[in-house]
Image (tube, grey):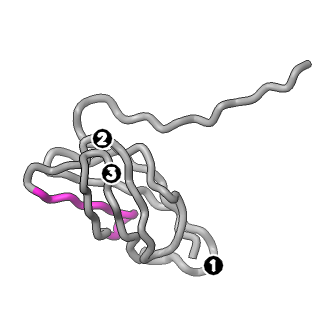
């Protein structure tokens, strides 16, 4: 019997025209590092964009509708030597995105 391979599952955006996240890159790291969020409609007509890593708010800059640069915030309960995964969301004046996962490693 020939071996089979399985392609990795790629994230998909939720239906509709609202904001949606595809990925955070890199998907793991420590507080203070820069990561990139990619997705759709990551723009707010009022200029208000809020990114949260779990319950912690992050500094963000979104130069285009599909990409945001984010500084990973400190997360309560992390840094104790074991990885902690949190949901990352982005909120604009129209909606909050689907979550993507980031893992604190240090």
Which region of the structure is painted magenta? Answer: 47-56
Residue labelled with disc 2: 40
First-in-chain label (1 vs 2): 2
Residue at the right extreme of this rendering: 1
Q: Residues within 10 Å of mark 1 (few under 14, many from 20)?
A: few
First-in-chain label (3 vs 2): 2
Q: Quadrant of residue 41?
A: top left
Describe the element under mark 2 as helix, strand or loop.
strand
Q: Is residue 10 left or right of residue 99?
A: right
Q: Residue at x 33, y 62 (%)?
A: 52
Q: Which mark is residue 67?
A: 3
**Where residue 50 appears, x then y in whole percent?**
24, 61
Q: CA distance from mark 1 to mark 3?
A: 31 Å
Residue 10 sits above or below residue 60 on the image: above
**Where residue 42 appears, x then y in whole percent?**
25, 48
Describe the element under mark 1 as helix, strand or loop.
loop
Residue labelled with disc 1: 81
**Where residue 99 appears, x then y in whole percent?**
39, 49
Q: Is residue 39 left or right of residue 50?
A: right
């Amino acid at each position: 019997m020939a071996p089979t391979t399985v392609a990795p599952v790629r994230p998909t955006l939720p239906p509709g025209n609202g904001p949606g996240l595809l990925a955070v890159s890199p998907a793991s790291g420590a507080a203070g590092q820069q990561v990139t969020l990619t997705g759709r409609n990551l723009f707010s007509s009022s200029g208000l964009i809020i990114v949260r890593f779990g319950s912690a708010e992050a500094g963000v800059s979104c130069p285009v509708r599909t990409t945001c640069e984010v500084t990973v915030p400190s997360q309560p309960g992390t840094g104790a030597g074991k990885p902690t995964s949190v949901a990352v969301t982005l909120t604009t004046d129209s909606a909050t995105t689907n979550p993507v996962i980031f893992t604190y490693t240090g």
